[in-house]
Image (spheres, rainbow, N blue to C red):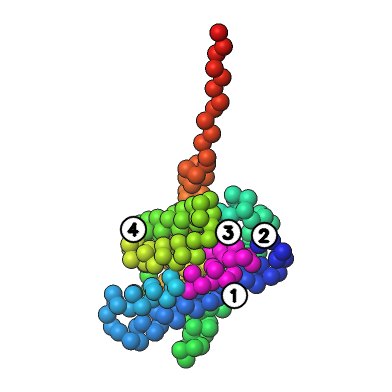
């Protein structure tokens, strides 16, 4: 992020989140128009999402860090990788970009710009799924920053592709994307009433991941031993 001022970083976060959400929502609309098979529709929704993450993180990562996710920005601020004063601005850019992405996807398919979702996704199992998915995402990012920074775009893209399938919530582990999904009544939608539980689970999962990985990835320095002299 060296050399890029805050307005440019915020623009990158808004643009990246917008394109990400447009991919999530647009591929969901396309999937349901092509097949009534829910498993095949989920696959059609999953593959473009994982692919666009690799692209967006690769090209925008050097500008803003390519968070596209308030939970990631929160963890970066708490770990002092992002100035705390920038965190709220990042979240605002991400939520705004997410809404723009939903509007863009709807307009591309000839739908009303916004439509509140009627897909209820609530209950302990889904909250646990969302928390675990976000925990895994943050663990992947933090471990990638520690050991293999250049691989992060692929690590995140592959992880989210997997998380769609191993979690009951078909998770995206992202409060900004969850909020944007509440504004579409398509395959990928989440009802507004379901948002508080989703977002609380995502932030909790991110916090636990930050605490655990901070401990786990901290190098252990063996104490020096002084040999006794005769």
Would residue 204 be seen by someone viewing this image from the given angle? no
Of circles 2 and 1, the one toward us is: 1
**Where does the magenta region start and end?**
52-72
Closer to the camera, 136 or 225? 225
Q: Give the dominant element type of the magenta stretch: helix, strand or loop.
A: helix
Cα–Cα span, label 3 and label 2: 9 Å
> Is 151 part of what is drawn in magenta?
no
User: Residue at (49%, 88%) from the top-left corner?
Assistant: 108
Between residue 125 and residue 38, name the one nearer to us: 38
Callout 1 secondary element: helix
Image: 156 above or below 52: above
Instruction: From the image, tell me which residue sits under label 3.
Output: 73
Q: In which quarter of the image is the C terminus?
A: top right
Q: In this view, does 15 lie to the left or right of 174?
A: right
Residue 95 image offset from top left, x and y in percent: 57, 69
Q: Which mark is residue 86?
A: 2
- State whether residue 67 is above or below residue 211: below
Q: How crowded is mark 4: few (under 14 residues within 10 Å), some or many (20 or more)?
A: few
Closer to the camera, 26 or 157?
Answer: 157
Label whose residue precedes the other's in the sequence (3 or 2): 3
The answer, for residue 28, to whether it is visible in the render is yes
Task: Measure how far apart labels 2 and 1 are at the Cα level.
Answer: 17 Å
The residues tagged by marks 3 and 1 sit, at their Cα atoms, a distance apart of 16 Å
Residue pictured at 46% horizontal, 56% vertical: 140
* Residues at marks 3 and 4, CA–CA distance in whole angstroms: 26 Å
Residue 125 numbered mark, or none: 4
Which one is in front in this view, the residue at disc 4 or the one at disc 2?
2
Question: Residue 216's x, y, as percent?
Answer: 47, 43
């Amino acid at each position: 992020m060296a050399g890029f001022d805050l307005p440019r970083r915020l623009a990158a976060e808004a643009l990246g989140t917008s394109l990400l959400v447009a991919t999530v929502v647009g591929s969901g609309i396309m999937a349901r128009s092509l097949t009534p098979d829910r498993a095949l529709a989920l696959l059609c929704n999953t593959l473009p999402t994982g692919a666009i993450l690799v692209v967006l993180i690769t090209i925008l990562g050097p500008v803003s860090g390519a968070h596209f996710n308030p939970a990631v920005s929160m963890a970066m601020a708490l770990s002092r990788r992002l100035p705390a004063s920038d965190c709220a601005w990042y979240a605002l850019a991400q939520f705004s970009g997410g809404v723009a992405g939903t509007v863009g996807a709807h307009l591309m398919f000839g739908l009303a710009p916004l439509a509140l979702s009627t897909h209820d996704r609530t209950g302990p199992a889904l909250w646990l799924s969302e928390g675990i998915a976000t925990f895994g995402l943050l663990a992947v990012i933090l471990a990638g920053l520690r050991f293999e920074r250049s691989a992060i775009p692929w690590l995140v893209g592959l992880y989210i592709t997997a998380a769609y399938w191993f979690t009951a919530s078909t998770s995206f582990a992202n409060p900004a994307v969850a909020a944007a999904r509440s504004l579409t009544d398509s395959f990928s939608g989440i009802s507004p009433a379901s948002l508080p539980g989703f977002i609380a689970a995502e932030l909790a999962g991110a916090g636990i991941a930050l605490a655990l990985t901070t401990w786990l990835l901290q190098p252990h320095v063996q104490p020096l031993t002084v040999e006794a002299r005769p």
